[in-house]
Image (cartoon, rainbow, N blue to C red):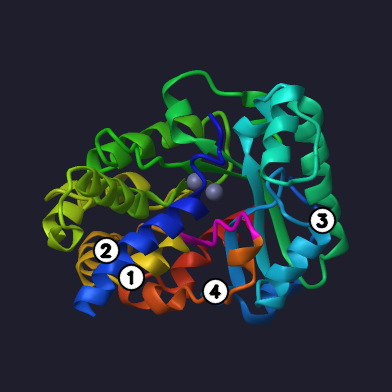
Amino acid sequence: MSSRNTSPFARLAAISAALGILCVIGCAQSRTTNNKIMSESSRFELRQMDMHLHAGMERPVPLDEWVDLAVADGRKALLLLDHIELYRKTQAEYEAWAKEDGLPLWYPVGSAGHKALMADFDRVAKERKDDLLVFKGWEIDSRELDGDLEVEPMRMADVLGWHISPNNGGEAPNGQFLIRRAKQLKELQKDFPVPMILCHPFSMRIENIVNTAQEQGRDISKITVKEYRFFQPGEQEQLAEILRGTSIYVEINRAYEGCWKNPVVREAFLEDIRPLAEAGVQFTIGTDHHGLHGAQRPFHPEEYCSELGVTPENANGIVRDLLAKR
Ligand SMILES: [Zn+2]
Ligand SMILES: [Zn+2]
Protein backbone atom coordinates (compact mmCIF):
# COMPACT_ATOMS: atom_id res chain seq x y z
CA MET A 1 0.00 0.00 0.00
CA SER A 2 1.46 3.33 -0.98
CA SER A 3 1.43 5.81 1.81
CA ARG A 4 1.47 8.60 -0.77
CA ASN A 5 -2.02 7.62 -1.76
CA THR A 6 -3.10 7.73 1.84
CA SER A 7 -1.00 10.70 2.85
CA PRO A 8 -2.62 12.34 5.83
CA PHE A 9 -1.47 15.66 4.53
CA ALA A 10 -3.27 15.15 1.23
CA ARG A 11 -6.28 14.16 3.29
CA LEU A 12 -5.98 17.20 5.47
CA ALA A 13 -5.96 19.37 2.36
CA ALA A 14 -8.96 17.51 0.95
CA ILE A 15 -10.96 17.72 4.15
CA SER A 16 -10.07 21.36 4.66
CA ALA A 17 -11.10 22.13 1.10
CA ALA A 18 -14.38 20.31 1.53
CA LEU A 19 -15.11 21.88 4.88
CA GLY A 20 -13.99 25.24 3.60
CA ILE A 21 -17.09 25.23 1.44
CA LEU A 22 -19.13 24.90 4.60
CA CYS A 23 -17.24 27.67 6.31
CA VAL A 24 -18.02 30.00 3.44
CA ILE A 25 -21.67 29.08 3.68
CA GLY A 26 -21.94 29.07 7.44
CA CYS A 27 -19.32 31.31 8.39
CA ALA A 28 15.44 3.72 20.47
CA GLN A 29 15.65 4.09 23.26
CA SER A 30 17.96 7.04 22.96
CA ARG A 31 19.57 6.59 26.33
CA THR A 32 21.89 9.45 25.56
CA THR A 33 19.17 12.06 25.98
CA ASN A 34 19.04 13.60 29.43
CA ASN A 35 16.03 14.91 31.28
CA LYS A 36 17.23 18.49 31.53
CA ILE A 37 14.71 19.94 29.10
CA MET A 38 11.81 18.19 30.77
CA SER A 39 12.78 19.14 34.30
CA GLU A 40 13.04 22.82 33.40
CA SER A 41 9.29 23.26 33.32
CA SER A 42 8.13 19.80 34.43
CA ARG A 43 5.87 19.69 31.41
CA PHE A 44 5.70 20.88 27.85
CA GLU A 45 3.15 23.20 26.34
CA LEU A 46 1.03 21.52 23.70
CA ARG A 47 2.79 23.19 20.79
CA GLN A 48 6.17 22.17 22.15
CA MET A 49 5.38 18.52 21.43
CA ASP A 50 5.09 16.70 18.14
CA MET A 51 4.58 13.00 18.70
CA HIS A 52 3.95 12.27 15.03
CA LEU A 53 6.58 13.75 12.74
CA HIS A 54 7.36 11.84 9.56
CA ALA A 55 11.11 12.00 9.21
CA GLY A 56 12.09 9.10 6.95
CA MET A 57 11.65 8.28 3.28
CA GLU A 58 9.11 11.06 2.63
CA ARG A 59 11.27 13.74 4.23
CA PRO A 60 11.69 16.67 1.84
CA VAL A 61 15.06 17.85 3.24
CA PRO A 62 18.02 16.38 5.18
CA LEU A 63 17.12 15.24 8.69
CA ASP A 64 18.93 18.02 10.55
CA GLU A 65 17.18 20.68 8.49
CA TRP A 66 13.86 18.94 9.03
CA VAL A 67 14.35 18.88 12.80
CA ASP A 68 15.49 22.53 12.74
CA LEU A 69 12.17 23.51 11.14
CA ALA A 70 10.27 21.88 14.01
CA VAL A 71 12.53 23.51 16.60
CA ALA A 72 12.14 26.91 14.91
CA ASP A 73 8.39 26.66 15.53
CA GLY A 74 8.99 25.85 19.19
CA ARG A 75 9.09 22.09 19.41
CA LYS A 76 11.03 20.57 22.32
CA ALA A 77 9.89 16.95 22.20
CA LEU A 78 9.64 14.93 19.01
CA LEU A 79 8.59 11.47 18.03
CA LEU A 80 10.32 10.88 14.70
CA LEU A 81 8.75 8.11 12.68
CA ASP A 82 8.10 6.70 9.23
CA HIS A 83 5.50 4.48 7.58
CA ILE A 84 6.80 0.95 8.06
CA GLU A 85 5.28 -0.29 4.79
CA LEU A 86 7.47 2.00 2.68
CA TYR A 87 10.43 -0.27 3.43
CA ARG A 88 8.61 -3.24 1.90
CA LYS A 89 8.95 -1.86 -1.61
CA THR A 90 11.31 -3.52 -4.06
CA GLN A 91 14.26 -1.36 -5.06
CA ALA A 92 12.61 -0.67 -8.44
CA GLU A 93 9.29 0.30 -6.85
CA TYR A 94 11.11 2.53 -4.39
CA GLU A 95 13.07 4.34 -7.08
CA ALA A 96 9.97 4.90 -9.21
CA TRP A 97 8.00 6.14 -6.19
CA ALA A 98 10.74 8.53 -5.05
CA LYS A 99 11.22 9.87 -8.57
CA GLU A 100 7.53 10.58 -8.95
CA ASP A 101 7.55 12.67 -5.79
CA GLY A 102 10.96 14.23 -6.38
CA LEU A 103 12.37 12.68 -3.23
CA PRO A 104 15.99 11.65 -2.68
CA LEU A 105 16.66 7.99 -1.88
CA TRP A 106 17.37 8.68 1.79
CA TYR A 107 17.29 5.06 2.99
CA PRO A 108 17.64 1.57 1.57
CA VAL A 109 14.57 -0.66 1.50
CA GLY A 110 14.14 -3.64 3.83
CA SER A 111 15.94 -4.27 7.09
CA ALA A 112 18.97 -2.19 6.05
CA GLY A 113 16.58 0.75 5.76
CA HIS A 114 15.05 0.12 9.19
CA LYS A 115 18.51 0.13 10.73
CA ALA A 116 19.74 3.20 8.84
CA LEU A 117 16.62 5.19 9.74
CA MET A 118 16.80 4.34 13.44
CA ALA A 119 20.54 5.05 13.48
CA ASP A 120 19.82 8.50 12.03
CA PHE A 121 17.16 9.14 14.68
CA ASP A 122 19.58 8.01 17.41
CA ARG A 123 22.26 10.34 16.07
CA VAL A 124 19.90 13.34 16.17
CA ALA A 125 18.74 12.39 19.66
CA LYS A 126 22.33 12.33 20.84
CA GLU A 127 23.49 15.50 19.09
CA ARG A 128 20.45 17.55 20.14
CA LYS A 129 20.09 16.22 23.66
CA ASP A 130 20.57 19.62 25.30
CA ASP A 131 17.70 21.33 23.53
CA LEU A 132 15.45 18.53 22.36
CA LEU A 133 13.92 15.25 23.47
CA VAL A 134 13.87 12.88 20.52
CA PHE A 135 12.09 9.54 20.42
CA LYS A 136 11.79 7.14 17.53
CA GLY A 137 9.06 4.94 16.18
CA TRP A 138 6.94 3.64 13.36
CA GLU A 139 3.52 4.40 12.03
CA ILE A 140 1.86 1.10 11.12
CA ASP A 141 -1.49 0.64 9.40
CA SER A 142 -3.84 -0.55 12.14
CA ARG A 143 -5.28 -3.11 9.69
CA GLU A 144 -2.04 -5.03 10.19
CA LEU A 145 -3.28 -5.81 13.71
CA ASP A 146 -5.71 -8.23 12.06
CA GLY A 147 -2.91 -10.14 10.30
CA ASP A 148 0.82 -10.74 10.60
CA LEU A 149 3.00 -8.03 12.07
CA GLU A 150 6.54 -7.22 10.96
CA VAL A 151 8.04 -7.65 14.40
CA GLU A 152 11.75 -7.11 13.80
CA PRO A 153 11.62 -3.36 13.04
CA MET A 154 8.91 -2.93 15.68
CA ARG A 155 11.48 -3.96 18.31
CA MET A 156 13.59 -0.91 17.42
CA ALA A 157 10.86 1.59 18.32
CA ASP A 158 10.35 3.69 21.44
CA VAL A 159 6.72 4.18 20.37
CA LEU A 160 4.40 2.41 17.95
CA GLY A 161 1.75 4.55 16.25
CA TRP A 162 -1.22 2.85 14.62
CA HIS A 163 -2.62 4.57 11.56
CA ILE A 164 -6.40 4.58 11.54
CA SER A 165 -7.53 4.64 7.93
CA PRO A 166 -10.59 6.61 6.79
CA ASN A 167 -11.65 3.40 5.05
CA ASN A 168 -13.15 5.41 2.21
CA GLY A 169 -15.78 3.43 0.34
CA GLY A 170 -16.41 1.32 3.46
CA GLU A 171 -17.66 1.85 6.97
CA ALA A 172 -16.18 4.94 8.63
CA PRO A 173 -14.08 4.44 11.78
CA ASN A 174 -16.38 4.52 14.80
CA GLY A 175 -16.60 3.70 18.49
CA GLN A 176 -16.78 -0.09 18.11
CA PHE A 177 -13.81 -0.02 15.76
CA LEU A 178 -11.68 2.02 18.15
CA ILE A 179 -12.66 -0.16 21.12
CA ARG A 180 -11.53 -3.23 19.16
CA ARG A 181 -8.21 -1.62 18.24
CA ALA A 182 -7.63 -0.48 21.83
CA LYS A 183 -8.13 -4.05 23.05
CA GLN A 184 -5.74 -5.34 20.40
CA LEU A 185 -3.05 -2.86 21.46
CA LYS A 186 -3.45 -3.75 25.11
CA GLU A 187 -2.85 -7.38 24.19
CA LEU A 188 0.08 -6.48 21.92
CA GLN A 189 1.78 -4.53 24.70
CA LYS A 190 2.42 -7.84 26.45
CA ASP A 191 4.98 -8.51 23.69
CA PHE A 192 5.89 -4.90 22.91
CA PRO A 193 5.95 -2.97 26.18
CA VAL A 194 6.20 0.48 24.60
CA PRO A 195 3.76 3.39 24.46
CA MET A 196 1.31 3.08 21.59
CA ILE A 197 -0.77 5.70 19.83
CA LEU A 198 -4.13 5.34 18.10
CA CYS A 199 -3.40 7.87 15.35
CA HIS A 200 -5.97 10.43 14.17
CA PRO A 201 -9.20 8.37 14.58
CA PHE A 202 -11.65 11.28 14.67
CA SER A 203 -10.48 13.18 11.58
CA MET A 204 -10.46 9.95 9.58
CA ARG A 205 -14.15 9.48 10.30
CA ILE A 206 -14.84 13.03 9.11
CA GLU A 207 -12.95 12.33 5.90
CA ASN A 208 -15.00 9.20 5.20
CA ILE A 209 -18.31 10.92 5.96
CA VAL A 210 -17.46 13.92 3.74
CA ASN A 211 -16.20 11.71 0.89
CA THR A 212 -19.26 9.49 1.03
CA ALA A 213 -21.60 12.49 0.98
CA GLN A 214 -19.75 13.99 -1.97
CA GLU A 215 -19.89 10.72 -3.88
CA GLN A 216 -23.61 10.55 -3.27
CA GLY A 217 -23.98 14.07 -4.62
CA ARG A 218 -25.17 15.33 -1.26
CA ASP A 219 -24.72 18.91 -0.11
CA ILE A 220 -22.07 18.46 2.60
CA SER A 221 -23.39 21.44 4.51
CA LYS A 222 -26.39 19.24 5.29
CA ILE A 223 -24.31 16.60 7.11
CA THR A 224 -25.49 16.53 10.72
CA VAL A 225 -23.64 16.36 14.03
CA LYS A 226 -25.19 12.92 14.50
CA GLU A 227 -23.63 11.64 11.27
CA TYR A 228 -20.22 13.01 12.22
CA ARG A 229 -20.41 11.65 15.77
CA PHE A 230 -17.87 8.90 16.36
CA PHE A 231 -19.38 7.26 19.43
CA GLN A 232 -22.74 5.72 20.24
CA PRO A 233 -24.07 5.96 23.81
CA GLY A 234 -21.95 3.97 26.27
CA GLU A 235 -18.95 3.56 23.99
CA GLN A 236 -16.89 6.38 25.49
CA GLU A 237 -17.17 4.78 28.93
CA GLN A 238 -16.14 1.43 27.45
CA LEU A 239 -13.13 2.90 25.69
CA ALA A 240 -12.08 4.88 28.77
CA GLU A 241 -12.32 1.72 30.84
CA ILE A 242 -9.87 0.00 28.48
CA LEU A 243 -7.44 2.90 28.12
CA ARG A 244 -7.39 4.53 31.55
CA GLY A 245 -4.08 3.98 33.31
CA THR A 246 -2.43 2.40 30.26
CA SER A 247 0.27 3.70 27.96
CA ILE A 248 -2.08 3.67 24.99
CA TYR A 249 -2.85 7.16 23.76
CA VAL A 250 -5.34 8.73 21.37
CA GLU A 251 -3.91 11.28 18.98
CA ILE A 252 -5.06 14.80 18.30
CA ASN A 253 -3.30 15.86 15.12
CA ARG A 254 -3.10 18.83 12.86
CA ALA A 255 -5.96 17.67 10.66
CA TYR A 256 -8.20 18.81 13.51
CA GLU A 257 -7.27 22.39 12.67
CA GLY A 258 -9.31 22.24 9.45
CA CYS A 259 -12.09 20.22 11.06
CA TRP A 260 -12.40 22.72 13.90
CA LYS A 261 -13.35 25.53 11.52
CA ASN A 262 -16.59 23.76 10.74
CA PRO A 263 -19.17 24.35 13.50
CA VAL A 264 -20.98 21.06 12.90
CA VAL A 265 -17.78 19.01 13.05
CA ARG A 266 -16.65 21.03 16.05
CA GLU A 267 -19.78 20.14 17.95
CA ALA A 268 -19.30 16.44 17.13
CA PHE A 269 -15.65 16.61 18.25
CA LEU A 270 -16.62 18.29 21.52
CA GLU A 271 -19.18 15.58 22.24
CA ASP A 272 -16.81 12.78 21.20
CA ILE A 273 -13.49 13.88 22.66
CA ARG A 274 -14.14 15.99 25.76
CA PRO A 275 -15.83 13.22 27.77
CA LEU A 276 -12.90 10.91 26.98
CA ALA A 277 -10.41 13.40 28.38
CA GLU A 278 -12.62 13.89 31.44
CA ALA A 279 -12.77 10.10 31.89
CA GLY A 280 -8.99 9.86 32.05
CA VAL A 281 -8.08 8.88 28.48
CA GLN A 282 -4.69 10.29 27.60
CA PHE A 283 -3.97 12.05 24.34
CA THR A 284 -0.91 12.86 22.27
CA ILE A 285 -0.29 15.91 20.13
CA GLY A 286 1.17 15.40 16.66
CA THR A 287 1.47 17.32 13.42
CA ASP A 288 1.69 14.33 11.05
CA HIS A 289 3.85 16.59 8.91
CA HIS A 290 5.25 14.97 5.80
CA GLY A 291 6.21 17.99 3.72
CA LEU A 292 7.43 21.55 3.87
CA HIS A 293 3.99 23.09 3.42
CA GLY A 294 2.90 22.08 6.90
CA ALA A 295 6.28 22.34 8.55
CA GLN A 296 6.68 25.99 7.60
CA ARG A 297 3.37 27.09 9.10
CA PRO A 298 3.04 27.71 12.86
CA PHE A 299 1.32 24.91 14.76
CA HIS A 300 -1.25 25.92 17.39
CA PRO A 301 -2.97 22.84 18.81
CA GLU A 302 -4.10 24.81 21.87
CA GLU A 303 -6.69 26.49 19.63
CA TYR A 304 -8.80 23.32 19.63
CA CYS A 305 -7.30 21.27 22.47
CA SER A 306 -8.34 23.55 25.30
CA GLU A 307 -12.05 23.27 24.48
CA LEU A 308 -11.64 19.55 23.85
CA GLY A 309 -10.35 19.16 27.40
CA VAL A 310 -6.92 18.00 26.22
CA THR A 311 -4.67 19.83 28.63
CA PRO A 312 -0.85 20.02 28.65
CA GLU A 313 -0.96 17.88 31.79
CA ASN A 314 -2.86 15.17 29.91
CA ALA A 315 -0.78 15.36 26.73
CA ASN A 316 2.51 15.16 28.64
CA GLY A 317 1.63 11.66 29.79
CA ILE A 318 3.46 9.99 26.93
CA VAL A 319 6.62 12.02 27.54
CA ARG A 320 6.59 11.11 31.23
CA ASP A 321 6.01 7.52 30.25
CA LEU A 322 8.94 7.51 27.81
CA LEU A 323 11.30 9.24 30.22
CA ALA A 324 10.43 6.74 32.93
CA LYS A 325 11.55 3.93 30.62
CA ARG A 326 15.01 5.42 30.12
ZN1 LIG B 1 -1.59 8.09 9.63
ZN1 LIG C 1 1.40 9.84 9.84
Disc 2 crowd, CA 10 A, few/some/many (<14, 14-19, 20+) = many
Of callouts 1 and 2, the N-terminal one:
1
Of callouts 3 and 2, the N-terminal one:
3
What's under tag 4, amino acid-wise? Phe
Query: Residue 156's x, y, as percent?
Result: 71, 36
Q: Tell me the residue that label 3 is attached to.
A: 62
User: Gap between marks 4 and 1, in whole Å?
Assistant: 14 Å
- The quadrant where residue 149 appears: top right
Q: Tell me the residue that label 4 is attached to.
A: 299
Q: Is residue 310 left or right of residue 289?
A: left
| Residue 239 visible (yes or no) | yes
User: Gap between marks 1 and 2, in whole Å?
Assistant: 8 Å
- The secondary element bearing badge 4 is classed as loop
Q: Tell me the residue that label 2 is attached to.
A: 269
What's under tag 1, amino acid-wise? Trp
Q: Nearer the viewer, mark 3 or mark 4?
A: 3
Q: Tell me the residue that label 1 is attached to.
A: 260
Q: Is residue 8 above or below residue 13?
A: above
- The secondary element bearing badge 2 is classed as helix
Of callouts 1 and 3, the N-terminal one:
3
- Residue found 78% across the figure and 73% down from its top: 131
- The secondary element bearing badge 1 is classed as helix
Query: Residue 295's x, y, as percent?
Result: 63, 66
| Residue 250 visible (yes or no) | no
Q: Is residue 98 above or below residue 146?
A: below
Q: Nearer the viewer, mark 3 or mark 2?
A: 3
- The quadrant where residue 130 appears: bottom right
- Residue found 31% across the figure and 76% down from its top: 307
User: Gap between marks 3 and 4, in whole Å?
Assistant: 21 Å
Q: Which region of the structure is painted magenta?
A: 283-291
